[in-house]
Image (cartoon, coloured by chain):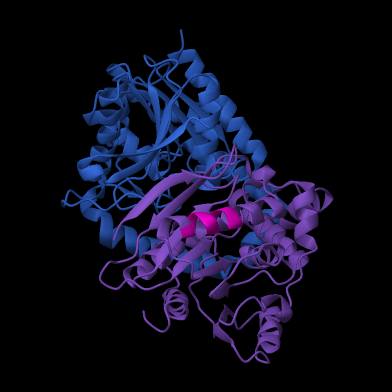
Chain colours: A blue, B purple
Amino acid sequence: MNERIVQFGDDGRLSGVWNTQRKNSNRPTILLTNAGIIHRIGAHRLNVKLARRLADIGFDSLRFDLSGLGESAPAAGALGYERQSAQDISAAADFLEENGRSDSVIGIGMCSGADNFQRAALADHRLSGLVLLDPHAFPALGAAIENMINRYLDPYRWARKFSELKLNAKTLSLRTVRSKSEFSEYGGDTDEQGRLRPPKAEFGNELRTLTKRGVEIGIFYTAYVQREITRATQFFQTFSDYQLEGKVTVNVNPRVTHTYTTLQSQNMLLTEIETWLKQRFTD
Amino acid sequence: MTATSFHFGEGDRTLYGVYHAPSVRRRRPLAVLLLNPFGEEAIRSYRVQKIIAERLAALGAAVLRFDYYGAGDSAGECVETSIDGMQTDILTAHEELIDLSNIRRVAWCGLGLAVPVALSAFSSANVNLAKFLGWDPVISGSEYIDDLTASHAKYLADALDMPERRIRRELSMQLTEVMGFGVSESLISDVVDLELNGSDLDVCDDVALIGRKSSGAFRKLHGQLTSTASSVSIEFDESVTWNSHQALNSIIVPNDSIAAIVRALADGDE
């Protein structure tokens, strides 16, 4: 096993596992970090599987815990979660550079991990690629129509929704209160899962900025956001003003869970990421 | 207090461990080996185990937590997990903890499937234990597999808006995965054969069990234990559990259980 436990960042506060083979030191190293507050191995150990699969095709990786998560100590300062996460990602890139690796890194992140890498890439130009697993999704008209048709045609959904009617009514009212009272100053809203979402323009502008800089971006959406998006074309319709078509690859699979629970979906994701990386970052 | 991550183990069976050195001010002659449950449950219990380790270390105990082969940051694939392998890893970690701490008074604290697995590891090896604590033990292996299957099916049904019946039907034909982790036929077969009895817990003079009041099997095991004078059983009925879907991404931990575990292992301190 070509894995080394490493400490880096201020006072060696951050903890990670560096999968390094020293074969292709000019290639970007893959950075993998927390999804939500799950420690660095990732949901269903997906980060470990990814790191080892990508090592087989010659990519080194560093999977690590952000400040205060997993094995990493909390930050001493008071930057706040978002800025601290970006700083931690930069600290990982610093560590790799100090150890003779390419100054180019690729971030693969799920959910909040995707948000963190996207944010970090805006500030740190060493991020040359992003694989975003369920980043923010924005309601598309096509998805609304498709979902409505599916709902009307599926008898199981009718039965299920009827039995959950009481619960849903309660949950929805709580979400409304939360989004109005807590997030109004932010300018964004919450998605169907209650996740804080930035304004569409902000998200689109960020992706446009990154693509203009030459950052390769691959987006993978799952059933988690199926109320917002069901097909890749809807993404480009939603962001038609941001010139992202042909610059960002989008894959939508409403038959897999947010965390890729089934082994089949995990294998499919690993293959897709492997192919995506090979096409963009190998000679 | 310091926590040090490291690799240990023999040959290709590289294991990932974290050693929590005891607080120098309150050092006590006790080394505690924390034993993870299986698969997804190990991820859900990660923070709980870490908190227990930190609290015990603060109370002066040396603590080692580790990932089995095929789990966490250790080498191997989950589908390679076996009961024999887990037992081997527990005994390897036991020796590692003694080497690191230079303390021979060792306690094992197992969670879920680790409880029956650790007890059979104990019976197959020449190990001296000062304490044994089982938290939420898997008592019936076949019921455990049924529970995992049901949990897997419910999670997929909720996440994909699919009929749970259909998923359960597919799983009952051939169980090759549960909650994101591959399982071998031999592992399922070995787990199904597990059946925990009160007599299995006769491993040392200080045994504690922590479980849920709502579990009939736990109440039964508790009943068997009360006839053993040296054993203590603590029951909890908590709304916050370590093993729910919500626990995966929640900062809330079952603090009453954690406190009870720390108290039981640290001779009443917490």
Q: Quarter-wise, where is residue A237 in the image? A: top left
In the displayed structure image, the side of residue B270 where residue A52 appears, left or right: right
Residue, x 25% and y 43% (percent of image)? A12
Report the residue at 55% width, 23% height from top: A56
Task: Give the residue at the far top of this rendering.
Answer: A283
Q: Nearer the viewer, residue B261 or A80?
A: B261
- The stretch in magenta equals B90-98
Res B40 quadrant in image? bottom right
Image height of A47 relative to B65, above or below: above
Give above or below for A124 relative to B254. Answer: above
Looking at the magenta stretch, what is its main secondary structure? helix
Residue in view at x 24 percent, y 39 percent: A9
What residue is at 54 percent from the left and 75 percent from the top?
A: B131
Q: How many marks?
A: 0
- Taking depth in this image into account, of B28 and B167 the one nearest to the observer is B28
Q: Is residue B100 visible?
A: yes
Query: Residue A204, image x and y in percent?
Result: 32, 30
Above or below residue B210? Residue B172 is above
Q: Position of residue A128 (x, y in %)?
A: 33, 21
Whether residue A275 appears in magenta in the rendering, the answer is no
Q: Is B153 in front, or is A278?
A: A278
Percent from the top left, x then y, of residue B119?
Answer: 66, 68
The image position of residue A137, as x and y in percent, is 42, 39
Residue at the outermost right position: B173
Can residue A121 be seen by looking at this rendering?
A: no
